[in-house]
Amino acid sequence: MPKYDTVAIVGVGLMGASLGLALRDRKLAARVVGIGRTAKTLRTARERGAIDDSTSSLARGVKSAELVVICTPVEQIASQVREVAASAPPGVLITDTGSTKEALVAAIGDELARGAVFVGSHPLAGSEKSGPAHARGDLYDGRLVIITPRSQTPVTASQAIAEFWRAVGAEVKEMSPREHDAVMAATSHVPHAIASVLAAATPAQWLDLVGSGWLDTTRIAAGDAELWRQILLANRDHSLRALAKFGKVLSALRRALKDRDGESLGRILEAGKQIRDAVGS
Amino acid sequence: MPKYDTVAIVGVGLMGASLGLALRDRKLAARVVGIGRTAKTLRTARERGAIDDSTSSLARGVKSAELVVICTPVEQIASQVREVAASAPPGVLITDTGSTKEALVAAIGDELARGAVFVGSHPLAGSEKSGPAHARGDLYDGRLVIITPRSQTPVTASQAIAEFWRAVGAEVKEMSPREHDAVMAATSHVPHAIASVLAAATPAQWLDLVGSGWLDTTRIAAGDAELWRQILLANRDHSLRALAKFGKVLSALRRALKDRDGESLGRILEAGKQIRDAVGS
């Protein structure tokens, strides 16, 4: 018998459709409903076998869902959580896959309609590719999902969400929304901003001369610009702090180079190497 | 019959030993002499089949060479070029594999002893790995080598060096030393510096939470810190200019984020995406 009766997925892009595939591959849900705005995306998700049914109406799609996962861009999540609470069965459990959490949980507020409970999730999984055509049932397999309950979140709810992610193959780690956003600013959002700035600052007439170093360092700049614009704005304060830290080290490197201070320059390069070597490939 | 009689390679690390393997695999030289300071490196290069003979004496190693390729760190190249000119047969042809050229050709000066001719080369090939144990006979295959003759370099000499690189499988492009260094600052040296700064600015306690974006963006920070210290110092002026350009775009991004100016932020991310998409994976 499947673990869940009806699971609804709001937004069936890469993340949502991959989740649907994982649920159906592992026979975890009796029925997976995909909710989206564009008919073509929903059709592709159905054809890929990621969802059983689809609808463009959020209210209709969540009507009989016991669990709703919102996989849309961060700017849309808060209002969709409230909409789900109003339309789904009482006490529905809601989570998401958004990359930022502090502003989101603040926007959702303390109490949802009809006893619905929201527990934020952020799977550290993804790809430069987007859309349901690139969905993979193993996208979450062995990946880390950070869940971000608040102090007032019922323990049963955060346990249920943790169990859900483990069921699709992920490992789960718990953090406060604030800690999550601080970590992500330094390890994900600012690296993305830096890759974009580096690509944007490269003269176009020299692009046929770039080597593997440039290709690696700028790779994530190819990601969806609108998605990352939203992420950086949603995690503005922590990102500005991480950018300030980056800027301080950058200034030290520029100063060392300007002053032909090989010792200080070597120290910065060596510090970067030690950090990078500590992580591995 | 081999194309070359004796080719001497000064420095049999990854670049030098790979060149020796390519020459011997393709039967391009009757004899390849490896010159190096450490017995262990020379022995590994011999065992890998990268060189026929080895010596720690540069003067002895180049005695009967018609072509000498210097594959040592950039700070050592200029003085070794002069030493080769003094010890090799008159009119010897000398090139290198160093990553910077403007300061190097200036340091070498206009005239070498005994009619020796130097033409700078920079193969856009390499690896995070170093040492002759990682040498590969196909390292230069299909890669670009930039050669940097000066206006007074005899055309026959630059043609001979271009032909040499084509013989080991590379494509050849000619640039002035100055243009080469400007291009490399923007496409290679500054990307390396930025990757190092980003790695160095990442809090160590969060390293188990980095994702594929951080891993890509910081990958080259694992490179040899001393080598890159030398490269940045040797290409100081162009690197400072490219860093200033990067810093300007970075400031614009920070300002946009600070001001919650989503339009400007989106424009920078979109510009980076367009540049990155233009290059491909």
Image (spheres, coloured by chain):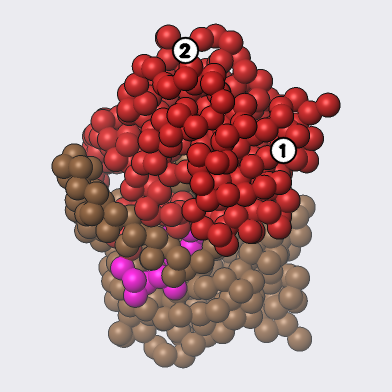
Chain colours: A red, B brown
Pointer 2: residues within 10 angstroms few (<14), some, or many (20+)? some
Q: Position of residue B80 (x, y in %)?
A: 44, 60
- Front-most of A262 and B244? B244
Q: Does residue B237 appear to the left or right of A192 in the view shown?
A: left
User: In the image, is residue B10 above or below residue B163?
Assistant: above
User: In the image, is residue A205 above or below residue A81?
Assistant: below
- Front-most of A235 and B220? A235
Question: What secondary structure is found at the residue carrying circle 2?
Answer: loop
Disc 1 sits on a residue from what chain?
A: A
Q: Position of residue B163 (x, y in %)?
A: 56, 84
User: In the image, is residue A241 above or below residue B229?
Assistant: above
> Is residue A10 in the magenta section?
no
| Foreground: disc 1 or disc 2 | 1
* Residue displayed at 32% across by 28% down: A107
Question: Tag 1: residue type?
Answer: Arg
Q: Which residue is mark 1?
A: A31
Whether residue B214 is visible here, answered yes or no, is yes
Disc 2 sits on a residue from what chain?
A: A
* Residue displayed at 61% across by 45% down: A34
Question: Tag 2: residue type?
Answer: Thr
Q: Does residue A205 appear to the left or right of B38 in the view shown?
A: left
Q: Position of residue A100 (x, y in %)?
A: 40, 33
Residue segment shown in magenta: A203-216
Q: Which residue is mark 2?
A: A153
Farthest residue, direction bottom: B156
Q: Position of residue B224 (x, y in %)?
A: 48, 44
- Magenta: main secondary structure equals helix
Q: Does residue B200 appear to the left or right of A131 in the view shown?
A: left
* Residue displayed at 38% across by 35% down: A79
Q: Looking at the image, is mark 1 or mark 2 earlier in the sequence?
A: 1
